[in-house]
Image (cartoon, helix red, strand yellow):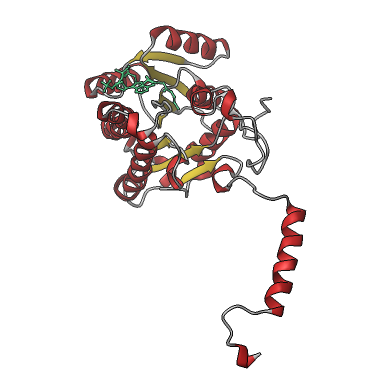
Amino acid sequence: MAMESPFKADILKGKVALLTGGGSGIGYEISYQLGRHGASIAIMGRRSQVLQAAVDSLQSHGIPAIGLEGDVRKRKDAIRVLESTIKHFGRLDILVNSAAGNFLIAAEDLSPNGFRTVIDIDSVGTFTMCHEALKYLKKGGPGKDISNGGTIINISATLHYTATWYQIHVSAAKAAVDSITRSLALEWGTDYNSRVNGIAPGPIEDTAGASKLGPEEMMSSRQHMPLFKLGEKWDIAMAALYLASDAGKYVNGTTLVVDGGEWLSKLRHLPKEAVKQLSRSVERRSRAAPVGVPKSKL
Ligand code: COA
C-alpha cells in the first residue's frame, strides 16, 4: 500500500525531469512522485497508448506532463526527445534512465542478437541519453554549489552482484550501467557539478520485471527475503526523490540498493535452532579430537 511521502511537497519546485520508460511500472511511479514534489515531467517511451495514459494520469494530479515517443536505441530519437523537452519546458534538471528490456532465458538458448538487444536498450541506451542530455544538464561548474548541476539517475539491478540464473544478458547490461554511473559521476561531477547515481531495485510488486523474472511459479517461498516481502514502486520513487533532491547533494557515483537486503540472501538450509544444536555438537567433537593437531601434543 502506497504511503504518504516523507519529503516536503516543493523539494523539486521549478525542476524539469525527463524519464525514459516513464510510462509504466517503476518509471511511471518515479514520474508521479517527482511530479508530486514540484517537477514538470517529460516521459519517453515506445508505445504511444501507454505514454498517453501516463500523461493523462499525471495531468489529472495537476502535474505538468508531456509524452514523447522514442526508442533509446536510436540516437536521433534521443536528440529529438531532448529537444522537445527543452522546447516545451525550457530546461532539463533531472534525467532518469528507466527504460529496460528483459526476459528469462538460459544462456545456451539466448541468441547473440537477443543478448545485444538488451545491452542496446539498457547500457547503450543509458549512455546515449546521458551523452545527448549533458549539454542541457551542465549548468554548474567547478567551484559552484554542487546542487546547481543537473543530475542523472540510472535504474539498475542487483542481478550481477553475484550471478543470477537465466539473466546473463541483463546482468551484463546492468554491470555496464553501474560502470557508466561511476565514470560519469567522476567526469561530470568534476567538470560540471552534475551528480550521476543509480538505483538497484529488488523484486518490486506489480511491475513487468517482477512478472517476467519472478512469475508466481517461482515465488512460492519468500523465506530467503530478509524483510519477507516484495518492495513497492513507491520505495524506488522515494530513493529517486532522495537522489534527485538536495537531500542527496553529496551523493555521487553510487548505486543505491533498494531491495530489503534480498541480494545478500541465500536460501536457508537449516532452521536457526538446528544450527545452534549442530554448532554445539561440532564444538564438542572438535574439543575431544582437535583436527590437525599431532596426537603427541594433546
Ligand atoms: N526469449 C528469447 N529471446 C528473445 C526473447 C525471449 N523472450 N525476446 C526477444 N528475444 C530475442 C529475439 O529472438 C531476437 O533475437 P534473434 O534475432 O536472434 O531471434 C532479439 O531478442 C530481439 O528481439 P525483438 O523482439 O526484435 O526485440 P524488441 O526490440 O522487439 O524487444 C525486448 C525487446 C526483447 C527486450 C522486449 O522484451 C521488450 O521490449 N521489453 C521491454 C519491456 C521490458 O522488458 N521490461 C522489463 C524491464 S525489467
278, above or below 206, in the image: below
287, above or below 16, in the image: below
Give residue 223's position: percent from left, percent from top: 67, 40
Among all residues in the image, which is located at the extreme front? 295
Among all residues in the image, which is located at the extreme bottom? 296
- Image check: 248 left or right of 105? right
Quadrant assignment, res 89? top left
Quadrant assignment, res 260? top right
Q: Is 110 or 158 nearer to us in this picture?
A: 110
- Can residue 150 be seen at all in this image of the molecule? no
121, above or below 280, in the image: above
Q: Is 175 or 238 nearer to us in this picture?
A: 175
Quadrant, the N terminus: top right
Give residue 106's position: percent from left, percent from top: 39, 32
Give residue 150's position: percent from left, percent from top: 38, 37
Q: Is 33 or 25 nearer to us in this picture?
A: 25
Among all residues in the image, which is located at the extreme left? 76
- Can residue 152 be seen at all in this image of the molecule? yes
- Number of on-image labels: 0
Give residue 292's position: percent from left, percent from top: 56, 80
Q: Residue at x 66, y 90 (%)?
A: 298
Q: Residue at x 54, y 28 (%)?
A: 214
Q: Residue at x 68, y 28 (%)?
A: 3
Q: In which of the image's four quarters is ligand 1 placed?
A: top left
- Image check: 219 left or right of 56? right
Quadrant assignment, res 217? top right
